[in-house]
Structures are given as structure tokens and as C-alpha cells.
Image (tube, rainbow, N blue to C red):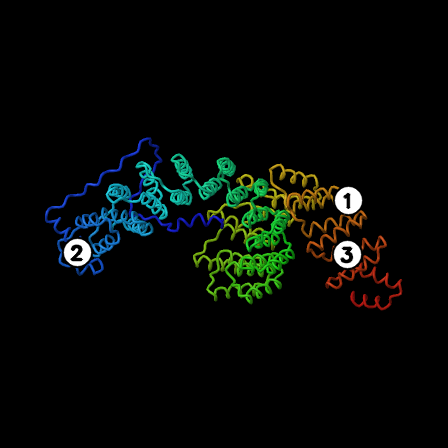
Amino acid sequence: MRWFRAIILLNRNEHIYQTWPRCITTLDSFNSLRPLPDYSPRKPTVKDSILVDRICTTISQRPLEPFNIILNRIQSNFNYHHLVWVLIRIKNNPKLALKFFRWAGAQNIRSMEAYCIIIHLLAASGKIKAAEDFIRDVVLNPQKAFASNPNQLFNMMIYTYKVCGSNPLVFDLLVKVFAQNGMVHEAMDIFQGVLRYGFRVSVHSCNALLGVLLKANEVELGWKFYQQMTRNGISVNLYTLNMIVYALCKADNVEEAERFVGEMDEKGLVADVVSYTTIVDGYCRKGEVEKAIKVVGEMVQKQLEPNVFTYSTLINDLCKQGKVAKAMELYKNMIDRGVNPDNVVYATLVRGFCELGNLQEAFRLVDEMVKRGLTPNVVVYNTLLDGLCKKIKMRDAGQLFQDMCNKNVVPDKVTYTTLINGYCKEGNMHKAFRLHNEMIGKRIAPNVVTYTALTNGLCRKGEVEIANKLLYEMAGKGLVLNIFTYNSLIHGLCKVGNIEQAVKLVNDMVEAGMDPDTVTYTTLIDGYCKQGNLAAAFEYLSKMLENGVEPNAVTYNVLTETLYNAGKITESNMIFAKMVQKGISPNVVSYNFLLRQSCDQGMMQDASKHLKKMTEQGHIPNKNTYNLLIEGHCKIGNLEEACKVYRIMVRNGFRPGVGMYNTLIEALSKKGKLQEARDLFNEMRKRGLVPDRGVYNAFIDQNYLEGNVEEVLDLRDEVA
């Protein structure tokens, strides 16, 4: 989630440096503290003491002069023991000690002991940032200090602590640096050691370590570490709480995360918007959107205003479930509460409406987005293009593509592939291949999906041989056919009625080591159903079940619709009941089937019940839904209700087709509602739609009886 990025900022250096041996981490509990050791370095000889005195005197009296000049004569006799002895002698002058340490480093004279002393001296003098930088240098480049493992470094830091009069914060820095550099187990070992000597580690360093543990998916170890923090009296903060909540939700323990928030609330640590938004996201990921909405309600009760991320999470999940109507309710609610939708919210809603086929509402949202000062990005444009291409509105898609380029939104691989797929479905292979060449010219490499669209388009036009050549070209570029490629080709072959070739391709797919999935079987079942071969369709349903592949709502919709059309109403209802029994939620197509049954039988009250249940489940009626209802009401003479549904349909962005206009006009004419019929007739003609000859004849006769000779002649010219 975008808002969790802040938690990761503590862990900027993600790489784990393999120069340290891997440590085995356990979380120990201990009752007694270890005493700090006394510092007892190797004692200098008389000759060594004279050299150390000489160095200390020289650099103390001449601190501003270059050391490589004033210490030039003693360089040949100088070693790392002298470095340590000098640093201890001048420990009360950290600035001088640091300059001397750097001079020694330039002579390639270093030791881990010297490094630890200089770190302590810097910490003792309040130069915390400089101390941290030195620790980081040793941790990332252990060879500089001849440190073979983290424990050796820690033990030396402990050993030199007392003699330097250091700051206990130095051990906190040590834990933090190991943690920040992704060295989780090493940091855990240092943490244990620090506690054994009675030092405290700050909550900030603990949070850094906890964050790295959780990022590495060490959730169980992270939880144990949190428990040890609290056992050792480290006061956790909101940052800690949010990381634990995130970890629990990531592990699908969302209820446990909620309980944890409640427990912390009782202890006085109140959760914030981030905490609750994490829980909301957790429930959404599990598909339990109702629980997520309940959590938002609790937030509001606690006077915590849900932010754009909270709403975005919920809206995204609702749209994924096809419950766009509920998503829109949340969208309106967020605006009412003063929360401004961002690009993500709009992109999600646009995608939701496009998937439902309601492009008018999708484009309206984009207009609203622009009015709010937001700029549609390539994702939004790709979503709109996909919606247009699915409806084969390629002229509109081409114009939108041009508009996108004019506004300096750079098309990507998805853009080109979407358009290519659309043109292939339209049968315009010339434009499809032109775009294919254009994307190559722009150095955008076509992927498997691009080639799948092209081969599918060729198969639809019966160009199976050319499609096969294209597949060879695809293989030559190192692209491997996947299940989606095969399914697309099988769909294309079934679309043109070439089921034998489709079945052969399924066999080839199995030989290539790919098992047919739900889409594969459903495509074949649909192909056989369209040919009226129900026996073959049910044979493949049996194969599907035998191979452990579960049918989905689309599979059942194909079978119920085919059986119903064949007059096998009892069998059709049995299949529908089986779908519900298996716990498969009906989709819009499923509900439209129920509506069709009710409307065909003139049972409009049942139809209304199905419509109500459909909308309660978050499914938005589509054009077919409205067509069925209008025809049903017209059939029983309920014109008032039919006209009401017609107005709702238009208001929701759906344009009636010729059949719908004809049905309404004929029904209104029979009832003597001539003016309403005339209005629809004129509206239809203005839209460029051609009424049936029967409708024309009815209006010609009506105008003749009314003496409108000029209108009669115009209508005769139109119908001629």
C-alpha cells in the first residue's frame, strides 16, 4: 500500500552484505546482567612509551599543521598498538583524536580496537551522527577494521566502553545500523547483547529492526521481537503498533490485528487512520468487504476521518467484485466528507464502469476528474481504450488514442496491445498490423498478449496458416505460448465455427504440458452450444469435472441460456440451481437469464424481485437488462412501467437500439398514445436509426388520416 512506504523508509539499504557470516538468531530471556569489563590493553615497552609521548606532544602542540609532515620521521616505527595508545592518551580531545585516527588510516594503520575507541570518543562528545557514520563504515566494510563477525565488533565496543567514558546511545546506534542495512539476524544478536549488559535500546532503533524483520516476511520472529521489546520495558509507539498491525494483516490474521488495536487502546496507545486503513485493506484482500466497511464505521465513531487511502482501498475491492454501485456510494460519501478523490480512485471507478460496459459513466468520471484538477494518466486512457475496444467502438478508440498523444500522454505496451486486440476483433487486420509495426518502430517490444491478439484476429478471419506463421515468429523471439495465448486462439477458432481445429489446438496444448482451464472448457462448450450440439457440450462439461476443473458463472450461463433457447426449460433451471448450490454467485448475465424467464412468462413481479436482488448484490443492470424489462412490460400492456424503465435506461447512459424503439413505438401506438409514439419515432430518426417497415407504415397511415400529406411523402421517401 502507498501509505506504508513510510515504514520502509527506515530500511533504505535493502541489500544484505555477505561479508559477515550468517548468525543463528534466537530470542533469549535472561534474569541477570553482565558487568562491563575493565579495559586492559597491551602495555607499551619503554621504547613504545617514548614514541607515544613524542606523538602526543607533537600533535597536541601543533594540531593545525599537517600530520603527514610533523609525524614524518616516526612513520616507519608506527603500528596499530601505538594508534590505540595515542587515542587513549588524547581521549579528552575528540577532534584531535579523529584527525590522528584519519592520519593513521592514510598510513594503512587500522584496527578494530581503534575503530571502536574513536566511535566511543565521538559519541561521548555528542557527535552522534559522526559516530553513526563510523559504525556504518565498519558494518559495511568489516575488512577495514579487521572485524571477522558482528559479535567480535560488539564485544570490542563493550570492552572499550568504560575507558572512553562513552555514551550508552552508541549501542543503540549499533543495533540501528545493522537493522537499516538489512542485516536482520546480526541486529537481533546485538540487541540481545546490549540488553544483557543493562543498556537500553530506543524504540526508534527497535522499530528499524522490526520493520526489516517484517519486510523480510519474518512475521513470527517479528512478533516475538515485539514481545521482547515490551518485556524489557521499551515503550512502543504508534509506529510500532502500525507495523504489527501491518504484519498481522499481511499474514491474513486481520481479526487478530483488530484485537491487538483494541488491547493497545486500553493501554493508552490509540490507533490512528493508518492503523485502521491497514485493517480495512486486510479485510478487503480477504474479500470480506462488509467487515471492512464496519471498520470504517468504527473509525468515524472514534472521530478518525477515513482518508483517501481508506476509501481507495474499499472502492478498489468493491469494483473488483463488480459492486460498482456500492463503490459509487462510497465515492459520493468521501466527497461529502471533504475527502478529495485522487487519480487512483478515479482510475479504479473508471475501470469498474468500463468492465460493466457503462462507458458513458466512465467518460463522465474522467471529465469530473479533469474538473478537479487531476490529469488522466496512461492507466486511465488504457482503461477507456479497453472499454471502447471491448465494444468494438474502434473509431472512438482511434480518436481517444489521438487525443491521448496530443496531450503528451505516452502510449505504452498495454495501449498498443489493447488497440491491436480491438482492431483484430473488428476484423481490421490492416490497422492492427500497422499499430504492431508502429510500436516496434518506437522500440516497444510486442509481448505474448500482442501476438495472441494478432493470431486470434487472423483465426477469426480463417487465416489459420498465417496465424501459425506468426506463432513461429513469436517463438523465434523467445516468447513462450501461455494458457492465455492458447485460450485466445481457441476462442477465435470457435468464433468462426472451426471447432475441430479448436479441439486439435487443445490437444496440442496438453502435449505442450499445459492443462486446459475453466476458460478453455467454457470456450469449447460455448462453441458446441452455438452449433446446437448439446451432446458435445455436455461431454466437455463432464471432461471438465473429471479433470478437477470447476465451472464458473460463465460456464453455467452458456448452458442455461442454450437449454432455455432449445425449449428445455426444466433442464435449464436445474443447471442454474446447480450453480447456486455450488456457491457460485450469479453475475449480471445470470440475473438477465432469470429476468428473461419471468418476462417471457409475463411474471413481471418476479422480474422486479430478481432486479432488486441483482442490485442488492452490487451488480449494475446493463443494456440487456433494460431491454428485457421494457419488452416484458410492453408484452403485458404495462406501458407506464415500460416508459419508466426506458427513462432510467437513458439516464444511466444506455442508448436503446432499433428493436427497443420498435417495441415501445408499437406498444404505445396500440394503446392510442400516439404523441408519445411519435416522439420516440422522431428521436429514433434523429439518431440515424432506421425503424422497421411496419413502424414506418403505421406512421404513414396515421399521417394520411390526419391529412399531413407532406409528412406522408417524406416518410415514403425515407422507407423507399
**Closer to us: 68 or 480:** 68
Q: How crowded is mark 1: few (under 14 residues within 10 Å), some or many (20 or more)?
A: some
Residue furthest front in the image: 61
Give the amino acid at mark 1: Gly
Residue 90, percent from left and from top: 21, 50
Ranked by sequence position, the earlier of labels 2 and 3 is 2
Q: Residue at x 33, y 37 (%)?
A: 195
Name the residue that disc number 2 marks: 58
Q: Nearer the viewer, mark 2 or mark 1?
A: 2
Q: Is residue 266 left or right of residue 229?
A: right
Residue 120, percent from left and from top: 27, 47
Label 1: which secondary element: loop
Name the residue that disc number 3 marks: 662
**Closer to us: 355 or 198:** 198
Ranked by sequence position, the earlier of labels 1 and 3 is 1
Whether 606 is drawn above or below 78: the answer is: above
Q: Residues within 10 Å of mark 3 (few under 14, many from 20)?
A: many
Give the amino acid at mark 2: Thr
The circle on residue 295 is: none
Q: Residues within 10 Å of mark 2 (few under 14, many from 20)?
A: some
User: How far apart in space, not on screen, are marks 2 and 1 (Cα)?
Assistant: 110 Å
Residue 466, percent from left and from top: 52, 60
Q: Is residue 10 visible?
A: yes
The circle on residue 602 is: 1
Label 2: which secondary element: helix
User: How far apart in space, not on screen, are marks 1 and 3 (Cα)?
Assistant: 19 Å
Give the amino acid at mark 3: Asn
Ranked by sequence position, the earlier of labels 2 and 1 is 2
Q: Quadrant of residue 201?
A: top left
Residue 320, percent from left and from top: 57, 48
**Closer to us: 564 or 19:** 19
Residue furthest top in the image: 31
